Image: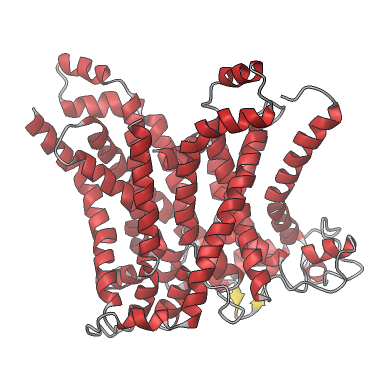
Amino acid sequence: MIEGAKWKKWLWFYLPMGMFILALLFPFYWMLVTTVRPDSELYRPWNHPLYSPFWTSHPTLEHVKNLLYETLFGVWMWNTMFIALAATLISLFCGVIAGYALARLKFRYAGLLGTAIFITYLVPQTLLFIPLADIIRDYRIGDTPWALILTYPTFLIPFCTWLMMGYFKTIPKELEECARIDGATRWQAMLYIVFPIAVPGILSAGIFAFTLSWNEFIYALVFLSSPEQKTVPVGVVSELIRGDVFFWGPLMAGALIGSVPVAIVYSFFVEYYVTGMTGSVKG
Amino acid sequence: MLEREGALAFWLLVPTLALLTLFIAYPFVRGVWLSLTNAVVGEPGHFIGLRNFTKIFDDSIFRTAALNTFVYTGVTTVFKLALGLWLALLLNRHFRGKAWVRAFILLPFIIPTVLSTLAWKWMFDPTFSVFNWLFWKLSIINSRINWLGDPELAMASIMTVNVWRGVPFYAISLLAGLQTINPDLHEAAAIDGANRWQRFWHVTWPLLLPVTMVVVLFSIIQTFADFQLVYVLTGGGPANATHLFATYAYQIGIGTGLLSEGAAISLAMFPALLLVVVFQLWYIRRVENR
């Protein structure tokens, strides 16, 4: 903490902090204002004398109604929720047991497999989407939720495995050994002793995986084609924009409401999320 | 005993390895094969050697996209690191409402990228831009700025959004690193007469470097392979001037259906990505062995 003159603290702390907060949060405020602004106010050019950017005197829910009743937005929300949950559960299951094996069991090639999984974690979706689209077509799961439920784990599992490996390493081995002396099998010790202790780690991995699935775009864009199969990000971008015509009211309403589930999950589990995120890079 | 552990480990790893083989290793092999054929949508095509690669290297749009990708990654990484570190240092102090500020600051990173980018697209709208209004009111401009209509300005706008989205991630990750540094070290340096800058440079920075490296390398990979921002903001336009590898691969491979050429453009990212990954593995090992 800086000692000395108060203005110094203002200059070096409050001012930059205020600027950061303003810059980082303004776009969300803009979404909110646009959502409740009537069209007559929305389409006033920037140099119109009545352009009032920061508030509206006639708030309306017209755009939200339009979004919910005139588009498939509700269906997209449901699709995204289902896909994100399914992909997260599959990834957690695979990641937790794989993480346990890599952190706790001695076997040949353990180091090699760990490195291989870490490398797949660094493979970006945009490297493989074209051959994957072909493969999805071969397996006849194109344009179904399964195209995403089965491919999302490819970027979620490596991350979950990596995070869980780190977590399992912090749990003392003695706990397991005690249980085994008392007659538990390796399997029982894992299931009833280690996994319950690892719940916070599992929660972190799960929350981070859920937000990543909700955010995913290019696979959803390429593997799904019918409007009623789409996820929120793809549906909003491809169905609410018709050619060059942007309906900014419903678009911003969609962006706002489409963010709500992630924001809720995040707000309840900020600490777990941060652990997951920082763990995702540190390993 | 080792035998039994090996068997258990095998069964625990089977689901993971199956999914990763099926949806990462196999697509990779298939992508390499695809890039060596002349396949288009609906037709498997046949082997044509490296002709797709010679074709794209002669393509001026591809070369622009390649250059854009490197510039985009380089410039945004510098800004994200500098601003992220600054924000992390601010957040590392004690002040009222810290938990709230930290929670809210992460919003740009957690809100689905496409959705927040749409808000930026609306703010960059040539006719209704709030930035134009602001600069006009501040008497900086008197004619409109077409944020996404001019090639260079469009690239700068895209970079701005990328930095906006990335700074919270850097800040929170670096903050986690800062919190592991023992405050006694700072006190000791202060007693020895080091000023604020010296303390940062000789105490904080060396201790923070391992975390910083991992965050930067991770972010470089993500930025290099970026797709969403460009797809939403400009779609690669105006006149194909703002493409990155990924958006151009999408336009050719999915948009026009030239699968093999699209796969080749995607794979052109591979050497650079491999270099970063190898460096990252080497660095992690070196830090661990110290």
x 75%, y 41%: residue = A16
The quadrant the C terminus of chain A occupies is top left
Q: Residue B286 appears at what percent x and percent y?
A: 35, 37
Q: B186 left or right of A223?
A: right
Vertical side of A48 occupied by A260: above or below: above
Q: Is residue B108 above or below residue A176?
A: below
Say left or right for A132 vs A19.
Answer: left
Query: Picture quarter containing residue B264?
Result: bottom left
* Residue at figure coordinates x 17%, y 32% from the top left: A106
**Residue B162 to residue B264: above or below:** above
Check the image and report above or below for B241 versus A100: below
Q: Position of residue A121 (x, y in %)?
A: 36, 50
Q: Give percent across and percent down for residue A194.
A: 29, 26
Determine if residue A140 is in view: no
Residue A227 location, x and y as percent? 48, 72
Query: Image quarter for residue A35?
Result: bottom right
Q: Is residue B192 visible?
A: yes
Q: How many marks?
A: 0
Coloring basis for residues: secondary structure
Q: Quadrant of the N terminus of chain A?
A: top right
Residue at the extreme right: A49
Judging depth in this view, the residue of B11 and A159 nearest the camera is A159
Q: Is B9 displayed left or right of A39 in the figure? A: left
